[in-house]
Image (cartoon, coloured by chain):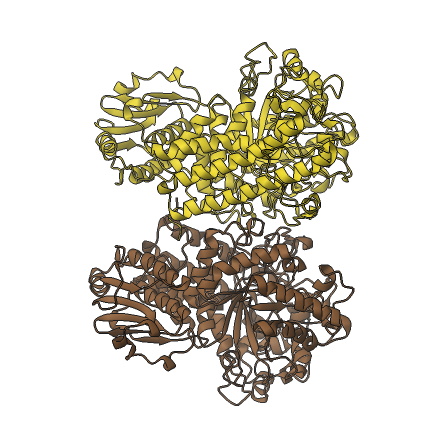
Chain colours: A yellow, B brown
Amino acid sequence: MLPQTGYKLWLDYRKVKNSELLQEYRNQIQSVYIQPDTKTLEIAQKELSVGLAGLLGDKPTFLERQNIKNAIIVAKIKDLNKEYQALFESSKIEENGFQISHVKENIIVTSNDDIGVLYGVFHLLKHLQMNLPLKKLPIFDAPKIDLRILNHWDNLDRSVERGYAGNSIWKWHKLPGYIDQRYIDYARANASVGINGTVLTNVNANALILTPMYIKKVAALANVFRPYGIRVYLTARFSAPIEIGNLKTADPLNPEVRNWWKAKIDRIYKEIPDFGGFLVKANSEGQPGPQNYGRSHADGANMLADALAPHKGIVMWRAFVYSEHDATDRAKQAYNEFVPLDGKFKENVLLQVKNGAIDFQPREPFHPMFGAMPKTPLMMEFQITQEYLGFSTHLVYLPKLYEEVLQADTYQHGKGSLVAKVIDGTLDHKKISGMAGVANIGSDVNWTGHPFGQANWYGFGRLSWNPYLSAKTIANEWLRMTYSTNDEFVTPMIKMLLISRAAVVNYMTPLGLHHLMDTGHHYGPGPWVSNLSRPEWNPVYYHKADSLGIGFDRTPTGSNATAQYAKPVADTFNNLETCPEEYLLWFHHLPWDYKLKNGNILWNGLALKYQEGVGQVREMQSLWEQIKPYLSAEQYQEVAMLLSIQLKEAKWWRDACMSYFQTFSKKPFPKGMETPKHSLKYYKSLKFPYAPGIRPSWH
Amino acid sequence: MLPQTGYKLWLDYRKVKNSELLQEYRNQIQSVYIQPDTKTLEIAQKELSVGLAGLLGDKPTFLERQNIKNAIIVAKIKDLNKEYQALFESSKIEENGFQISHVKENIIVTSNDDIGVLYGVFHLLKHLQMNLPLKKLPIFDAPKIDLRILNHWDNLDRSVERGYAGNSIWKWHKLPGYIDQRYIDYARANASVGINGTVLTNVNANALILTPMYIKKVAALANVFRPYGIRVYLTARFSAPIEIGNLKTADPLNPEVRNWWKAKIDRIYKEIPDFGGFLVKANSEGQPGPQNYGRSHADGANMLADALAPHKGIVMWRAFVYSEHDATDRAKQAYNEFVPLDGKFKENVLLQVKNGAIDFQPREPFHPMFGAMPKTPLMMEFQITQEYLGFSTHLVYLPKLYEEVLQADTYQHGKGSLVAKVIDGTLDHKKISGMAGVANIGSDVNWTGHPFGQANWYGFGRLSWNPYLSAKTIANEWLRMTYSTNDEFVTPMIKMLLISRAAVVNYMTPLGLHHLMDTGHHYGPGPWVSNLSRPEWNPVYYHKADSLGIGFDRTPTGSNATAQYAKPVADTFNNLETCPEEYLLWFHHLPWDYKLKNGNILWNGLALKYQEGVGQVREMQSLWEQIKPYLSAEQYQEVAMLLSIQLKEAKWWRDACMSYFQTFSKKPFPKGMETPKHSLKYYKSLKFPYAPGIRPSWH
């Protein structure tokens, strides 16, 4: 069977191949000191044992004393020998940070706390996995963001909304008695990249998770995750007091409702003393919320925050709201709803904001809320699962997307007001900061469906630790840890990862187009869909193609959504001279013969962008051929099959979209664009009733 | 991560530990001859390569000539050298059978056909895996049953009806382009035990599987399975001509309907030349069927059979029917419906009959249809997935149940008319024979949820090859292949497996009780359920407990279901003196103070049987403790957790059932039965809205 099933993720710990380097490592790592006197340090010891055995080929020797040489010494600063202690400054190491240094022929991994030590151990192992020389030490590192959290859109029946890697890894039925090995390996993988929280349940929430039977199950998971530094969070269904509490209302200002939540939360903390808190989707896409009772989002969030505060729990309140009753522009609505509430939220509330104002598109301009709420901590919500990006069949390296958003400049305090600084809290000196990623994790043996989906989980984790890392740095780490440290493998693979995001933008939604995906499942193109009850659920709402042209005018002549950005940003987007062409049709409705910067008319340029996306997939295929020698036959074959599907679907996107837009432009396809294989009627006829990831009730 | 995740099933090929034996093997297996000139032989070669590398520690040397010594020579008889050929008699080896013999210092594995060679290779590898001496050769073997088929109750949305090991392994969305490695490993595992067919879809069928888009996906799976000797079958929804064919009727005698099916089937064979045929659930539990049009089951089956016959396809028509309009006894209805049709079915129709007349209970008397239809091939339908047997949490070794059924004597042609002989066709000289098993396979890393669920898949396969094998023989094989060949491991583990089936009968439904499971999900006890629309869906229908006593009178004073058996069998069951006590309450309604053979009154005896079941789980736990040294920490811990849950649930069964029955018997619990921990009200209050395996529409 498969020599490498992908189950081990980036923690495979293959033996070091370079014999000189192996000798260097072995000389330095003749023994290891670590006292497993807490569960976390026990885990660190076990990881060192497994990791070093794999990397160096022999189980490490653990010694009981620090007075040794050519060893690794792992301990909190306060537990180091006096002579070592003198060399470290506690105050210089932040919470959960670590230092790895050469001291007297030893390598010391230390921190002020257990979790910092564990992070340090994972870091040292990564150093060896990447085959870096030991002289590259010392290393200081610490997380720049407080809350580094996965969001699982997992239902209690184990279906996963927008999940493309099998079903939920939470085996609710067998909990609390049965602890799946996967829970442990999930915790290890997360700890290795610094993820320190997990929301177990879908934002489209089910109140049953708050009943005693389920709380016991949640507690069992919390017990597994705790020593890895991972807290458990749940989604709170706002109407739970009615559904499981027998109350007549869920009005957040009603005293009975407030008492119900307080009692419920007290009960949860009895079972889970370090429970993290709640993530809430309220008054959004049919979910109940405070507005059902004429109250504001702040009223709703603060009610929960009050009940959580005595336990140091937090509320992550999602800003993803839009209404079918607001006819102007969906892109404006979250801002309009929330920005006026700045300063109204309790201290333990964070607003969780998607990276863009629509919904996890292949490319969106950064969300205008970033930087616009100086008194409220804003969490980033990235999507790791590829709802709009080809599910788990397309290879799309998402850190490239994340990097683009984090590096965007809001100009809220002048140049350099990066989104990353909003998120890490430094721009407005926030007391708490966070980043959430909607997980792409499921029950597939390799966790993420596409083996390269693992890179997106890894990359999200790394960026939640340090939002200033480059996508390239992360790609380099992941590739070396997961597959091979050979440069002839790594160099073309970095190239493949980095073009993959440009490819998907080009073959799905180039030049600022967005939300052209077929409705419900979001699989494949559906730019013609116009028959859904809510206008903003229809792709035609977003592209507005007509005989004159295409695009959504969000400038002052249109919806004026650009006014939500700081002036320099708004000016840039409003002006056709300065608006980046990748956002062109996001902000402007332009005639088919509008001249692009390269001299092509818009129609031709659009066609060639689609074609370029298809070409980029072909390039990815050829890079994959090139690195074949570094893979097992099965590893090679798996991704080769997936790339073939991706190419087929890239063409499908190009041909379906261009054939449809042609009904408006009435222009021939330009030279350089391959001719569609099928008729528009054919593309419109395709149906996928069991596309994965959709809510069962939607079938 | 896990040293042994269970993914490799019984094909782990661990290195032989006994050094003398290893030397013996190495001396004999210095090289291997096999010409991979067909896909099947290529697979055989690959399996030898992986298997011998694992078992002997070195990759085998493959040579191109047969004129060698101390080698394994693998070839069809016609491809052997003349001098070897002379030593084998083609006519003595049946279709897909094989012979393994010592010839001139070599071991020859041969057959008349490729699949026989592949089976022989797996058999030889098993011989080595079990660490058997090579002098134990030669071996002749051949399958005794023609169709050895897994039934997957898998839906197109990847949910699995009655599936407890994750979701479906068929990734429909990614087919046909993506061939999951699991498909290959599934085929290997099946071929290794001789399974030669798979029904991919749920008997509660969806007509979409017959549309061109899905047929292409099915064809891709058929291409993977073909060289492993495995044919693909589908379930046919009887109303498909209406649902996907735009016809107004599905009447099997309507010419348009007949033409539609003929065209549909011709189309399928164009894509899948060796398509196996259809499995049909008709006029059963709401499924459409010929009776909707006033036609008989024979009319329906024959219509499909006619269309399949030119392609050598078959129809497997399920006999699992019962009607809410028949007030007498559900147990009688399949017999009443089908036995009068004996002789009316086309040659390529088999009736697929569940092992007992109700529904996959922990214990049922054999189905009275076995032996009662001398002109019709009857296939056995066993359930491997544990719908009524504790899902994938309880360790229940099912070959013990299968053996009991197969060894039962129908007396249809006098003593010795075993069910096994009905199934293998020898009793009435049937032209075709078959055995089906409802699969327990899902997307869990270890395939079956409970690691010991693998033994049930393995055991089903072995019994479908040879229905006369003992459960003990099979347990011995599976344990040695999967875990350890050490007798100190194997002996207690065989004991554990063999008592596990008795345990579940005792703690769930002792003394012939049946169908006490809570309704819908069938998880846990629900003997009190009486409010369902169809009487025969209520547990009270089956136990008929009242102030006088308990049990279902199926003798001539009651429903007279016993009359469906041959006279000697009926007489045995009717007579309280001769009726085996394990079937007592299946056939008799008896007073609470009825005297059992051991002198206890029925009430006390029932209590002590429940208690015995609980005790047997404790015994299983203690056996598991005993073999701890032979397992990794993770392997030990996983089953230890599951046994803890099993013990808890065994007590739950005892306490809930006995507390409920006590409301009728009004008698105290006897000495020897532990006192229930909770009230009956508590047990009745337990709800499991997301128990796995239920149809989503039933939630």
Q: Is residue A248 above or below residue B614?
A: above
Camera-side residue of A502 and B192? A502
Question: Residue A224, how many percent across, how many down?
Answer: 47, 40
Counting labels gives 0
> Which residue of the protein is positioned furthest toward the top in this rendering?
A414
Q: Which image quadrant is residue B32 in?
A: bottom left
Q: Would residue A533 be seen by someone viewing this image from the given angle?
A: yes
- Residue sitting at the far bottom: B414
Quarter of the view holding residue B97? bottom left
Q: Position of residue B389 (x, y in %)?
A: 54, 63
In the image: residue B209, left or right of residue A637: right
Asked if residue A524 is positioned above or below residue B356 in the image, the reply reads above
Report the side of A258 relative to A171 (left or right): right
For the point 48% across and 58% down, which residue is it?
B224
Residue B33 at x, y percent in the picture: 28, 64
- Nearest the eye: B362 or B219: B219
* Side of B147 where A299 appears, left or right: right
Q: Nearer the viewer, residue A453 or A378?
A: A453
Q: Is residue A365 visible?
A: no
Whole-percent x, y for residue B659 in the image: 61, 62
Depth check, front residue: B568 or A604:
A604
